[in-house]
Image (tube, grey):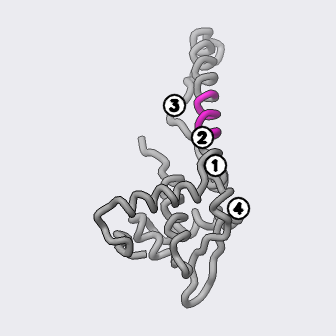
Amino acid sequence: MSLDSRLSSVLHLLLHLMESQRAIPSERLATALNSNPVVVRRTMAGLRDAGLVTSEKGHGGGWRLACDPDPTTLFDVYRALGSPTLFAIGNRSQNPTCLIEQAVNAALDDTLQQAGALIAARLQTLTLAALASDFESRRQRSLCAPQENPHGL
């Protein structure tokens, strides 16, 4: 089973955009994620539709942060991605009249609903600004010079 890492990847890109004074092309963002520029453009288009980023065409074009990082939550980004499924666990539905299956599904539904609500609540308390602050603290504590960037962005 593969995990959906789009939220993590997009948050990574948004932090790069926060630091950049210029637009960053999809090709460079794709290189940072070891991904394909078409995938980056498709994903970023959803963020643009949500007002989180803007795009500029032509020479020197690319993506820029459009939102204020202070009030923008990780939940806002999660919703802009289409609210991907949080869990790989699902219910068995081969025999819906089976009372055992019904009991198991009810227990799992309730548990997954509660866990999802906890995750959503936590994502609503974390902002892009807080994420950037944590990154900056880590950079200050690291042995790397502040201008070093392993992605070349």
Task: Give the quarter of the image for residue 94.
Answer: top right
Going from N to C along the chain, the mark reached first, 3 or 1, is 1
> Would residue 117 be found to the left or right of residue 28 on screen?
right
Q: For mark 1, give the secondary structure.
A: helix
Structural crowding at the residue carrying mark 4, measured as other residues with C-alpha within 10 Å and reported as few (<14), some (14–19) or many (≥20): some
User: Is the residue 87 above or below the residue 83 in the image?
Assistant: above
Going from N to C along the chain, the mark reached first, 2 or 4, is 4
The reply to whether discs 3 and 1 touch (Cβ–Cβ < 8 Å) is no
Structural crowding at the residue carrying mark 1, measured as other residues with C-alpha within 10 Å and reported as few (<14), some (14–19) or many (≥20): many
**Residue 89: assigned label:** 3
Going from N to C along the chain, the mark reached first, 2 or 1, is 1
Q: CA distance from mark 3 to mark 2?
A: 20 Å
User: Is the residue 94 above or below the residue 76 in the image?
Assistant: above
Which residue is identified by label 2? 122
- Name the amino acid type tagged 2: Arg
- In the rendered structure, does residue 145 fall within the stretch colored magenta? no
Task: Give the quarter of the image for residue 138.
Answer: bottom left
Give how far across and how far down residue 36 sits, in percent: 45, 68
